[in-house]
Image (cartoon, grey):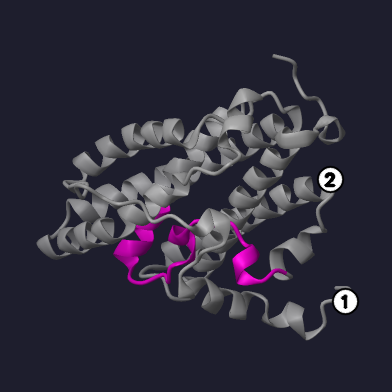
């Protein structure tokens, strides 16, 4: 299958699919980064205050990289894409917009999300669209540290006291259906797969399940049975938490969208 060397070489349904994929990944990163930043000054220990601030910076930086590629594909500039859209125009999964809740939920959400990123970035690092393959390779190397951090905390809290275990299990029960929503199929899945750019979402989900199951088992946690995935985010149907998040995220930008900083 012929490699696509530049953004300018994309066209038709393949280009539409790549644009949709980049929006999904960028919006996920932007929202999870913003949620992580809410722990700055509030994490349970100083080390985690620093760690989550750093991870938030990483995620938002990754979002910016995706937005920049979107701009190269003819979309608006990064700031406009990040701050200038209505809630229904975002394509993030519901998982990333949910409120930060307690520390157990934050850890479980971050672990499940990071595992999905590892799976997707690994696939994209070998895709036929060269600019995206190069970016995915770079970002995957950074994300591996997030995975290491998450695994340590999953085991630490899952196998600690009865109380911490109960909180982690409750967090997993809440987060898992939303995490499945990270793999919501879209109309672009088939064109992306046929072009050798991104595998079908069901394939990625299966890889993700295989990756998270051993860690959850080691932590003594039970995957909830018969979960119904929470879909809708990829087509602009979001929980109320996203509107609340955007009210804060866009506050300064909306004072004067034309301002130069």
Q: Are marks 1 and 2 in contact (CB under 8 Å)?
A: no
Quadrant, the N terminus: top right
Query: Which residue is disc 2 drawn over?
Result: 72
Say above or below: 67 vs 1.
Answer: below
Residue at (40, 37) in percent of width and height:
205
> Residue 99's spot in the image, x, y percent?
43, 72
> Residue 106's spot in the image, x, y percent?
38, 62
Q: Which mark is residue 176?
A: none
- Drawn side of residue 112 relative to residue 140, left or right: left
Q: Residues within 10 Å of mark 1 (few under 14, many from 20)?
A: few
> Residue 202's spot in the image, x, y percent?
42, 35
Q: Earlier in the sequence, mark 1 or mark 2?
A: 2
In the rendered image, the residue lying farthest to the top is 1
Quadrant, the C terminus: bottom right
Say above or below: 187 vs 260.
Answer: above
Residue at (13, 60) in percent of width and height:
161
Closer-to-camera residue (5/200): 200
In the rendered image, the residue lying farthest to the bottom is 255
> Label 1 to label 2, Cα distance in Å?
21 Å
Residue at (52, 36) in percent of width and height:
120
Q: Which residues are magenta?
A: 85-111
Q: Is residue 166 magenta?
A: no
Q: Secondary structure at mark 2?
A: helix
Q: Is residue 88 magenta?
A: yes
Q: Which mark is residue 258?
A: 1
Q: Secondary structure at mark 1?
A: loop
């Amino acid at each position: 299958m012929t490699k696509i060397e530049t953004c300018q070489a994309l066209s038709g349904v393949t280009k539409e699919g790549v644009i949709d994929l980049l929006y999904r990944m960028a919006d996920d990163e932007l929202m999870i980064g913003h949620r992580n930043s809410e722990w700055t000054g509030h994490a349970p220990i100083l080390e985690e205050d620093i760690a989550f601030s750093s991870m938030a910076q990483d995620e938002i930086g990754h979002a910016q990289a995706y937005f920049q590629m979107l701009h190269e594909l003819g979309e608006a500039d990064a700031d406009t894409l990040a701050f200038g859209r209505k809630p229904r125009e975002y394509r993030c999964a519901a998982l990333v917009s949910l409120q930060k809740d307690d520390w157990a939920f934050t850890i479980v959400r971050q672990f499940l999300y990071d595992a999905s990123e590892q799976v997707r970035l690994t696939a994209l690092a070998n895709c036929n669209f060269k600019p995206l393959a190069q970016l995915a390779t770079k970002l995957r190397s950074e994300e591996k540290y997030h995975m290491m951090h998450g695994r340590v905390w999953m085991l630490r809290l899952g196998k600690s006291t009865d109380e911490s275990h109960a909180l982690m299990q409750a967090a997993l029960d809440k987060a898992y259906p939303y995490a499945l929503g990270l793999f919501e199929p879209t109309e672009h899945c088939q064109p992306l797969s046929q072009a050798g750019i991104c595998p079908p979402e069901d394939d990625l989900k299966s890889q993700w399940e295989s990756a998270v199951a051993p860690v959850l088992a080691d932590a003594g946690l039970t995957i909830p049975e018969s979960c119904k995935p929470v879909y809708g985010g990829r087509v602009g149907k979001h929980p109320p938490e996203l509107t609340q998040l955007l009210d804060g995220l866009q506050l300064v930008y909306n004072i004067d969208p034309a301002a130069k900083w």
